[in-house]
Amino acid sequence: MEKQKKSFTQWLTTSITVRMLMVGILILVLLIPLSYIKSLIQERAYRQEEVVKEINQKWGNEVLLYGPVLKIPYQIHTTNKTWDDKTKSYIKETITTIKHAFFFPNTLDINANIESETLGRSIYESVVYTADMNIKGSFTTPSFETQDIAKKDILWNKATVIINSTNLKGIRSNLELKLGAQNYPLQSRYTQNSYTNTLETKFLKEESIPKENSIDFSLNLKINGSEQLRFIPVGRETNVAMTSNWASPSFDGNYLPDTKTKEISTDGFKANWTVLQINREFEQEFFGDLPQINSSAFGVKLLIPVDEYQKSERAAKYGYLVIALTFLVFFLIQTISKVHIHPFQYLMIGLALTMFYTLLISISEHSSFLQAYLISGTSVVALISIYSKAILKSFKFMSFIAASLAALYSFIFVIIQLENYALLVGSIGLFLILGTIMMISRKIDWKND
């Protein structure tokens, strides 16, 4: 009985199957601190978003311009019949209501020069800008024929011009719209339940209204904003020319700039858009209410080129792979060389591997991701290599483990940097790793387990 007990104990300490189960259980246990590290990265990223929003709100949020639009009120007459019991007949009453017609410009040309900079608070940064814009174009004679509105019901003397914007707070110049030979100051108007805010002129003078002939307009606008600058192509032909000193733009929205004129360099970018009425999904005039056509906007996002938290999160996603492959290397060395490695020693190695990610995120907040990755990777590889020398009692094995970890961290760094080819390079790399492990594991005698 004592002999059987001793044999079972020996089997527990020498069995390859038991070792594999032990390593697998330790890998599952180490997924717990890995999940906490991922939560920490997400928490820091969320904190960054909050600080960036706070910076942007104080400087000026994203800018979306909608206009100029010619606004002309008109009268609608409706007849209401009510029954009178005394006269035993219907009494007709004419009710007059005021509605508005909105006419988009015939041409709209916008020239925008964007001076960008980064504002920081503590360890966080946001990109902000000041846009100096020259807006010009022309209005053609409005047509009310489609609505069958009589000329006497058009209130020309109460016509105005409006411009909608998402960011009145960021405006840094007094706005005067030049319409023909007259200048009209723009004043803010309260808008309920609207994404944009309205700027409106006073009633236009007779000579400023395009009753019979087209009339030109121009406006200079200086505005502070953050992250995005977009326009809605309200002109029958809309032309936008944009220049900036920001070198990492992202052109988004419903229309992309002309590829022949687009230039991006380390000194900034230039871009031009031309949008015709036939390219849009809406017409040139609206009666009743001004529509919400923000989905037709186009423009540019000014992006901070490196997001350290995104890269740290991507690196942490490979944590289980690093732990599994490192444990597998130690397992193969243990099995082939007959060196005993205690489960506690596996646990210490696994914890050292998880420390890489806390070092990475904390150092990257104060330096570049590359520097943080080099410092964290070198520290962890050195720590595990020195520890393995004490365990395995072999300089050869220590060198092999150091080289394996260095190659693994280098491989993951390359995958993180790649975007279009990340899946391809990752698949090829994992295939080569699997092939190497299969070749090494041939030397293991599985029959004597």
Image (cartoon, rainbow, N blue to C red):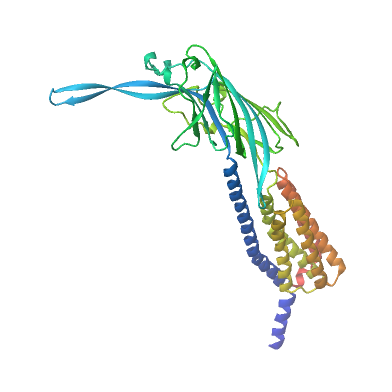
Q: Quarter-wise, where is residue 95 in the image?
A: top left
* Image: 266 above or below 439: above
Please give left or right for residue 289 compared with residue 347 in the image. Answer: left
Judge by depth and name the residue closer to the eye, 411 or 69: 69
Instruction: Assign the N terminus to one quadrant of the image.
Output: bottom right
Q: Looking at the image, which residue is at 82% across and 72% down? A: 390
Q: Nearer the viewer, residue 436 or 300?
A: 300
**Vertical arrangement, residue 274 with respect to residue 170, above or below:** above
Q: Is residue 69 left or right of residue 397?
A: left
Q: State the quadrant of the C terminus.
A: bottom right
In this rendering, would 32 be left or right of 372? left
- Residue 140 image point, x, y percent: 52, 16
Q: Would you say residue 428 is visible in this rendering?
A: no
Rendered residue at 50%/34% (across/down): 197
Question: On the picture, is 340 further left or further right than 222?
Answer: right
Image spot of residue 181 (x, y percent)? 55, 16
Q: Position of residue 405 (x, y in %)?
A: 79, 60
Q: How many marks?
A: 0
The foreground one among 130 and 341 is: 130
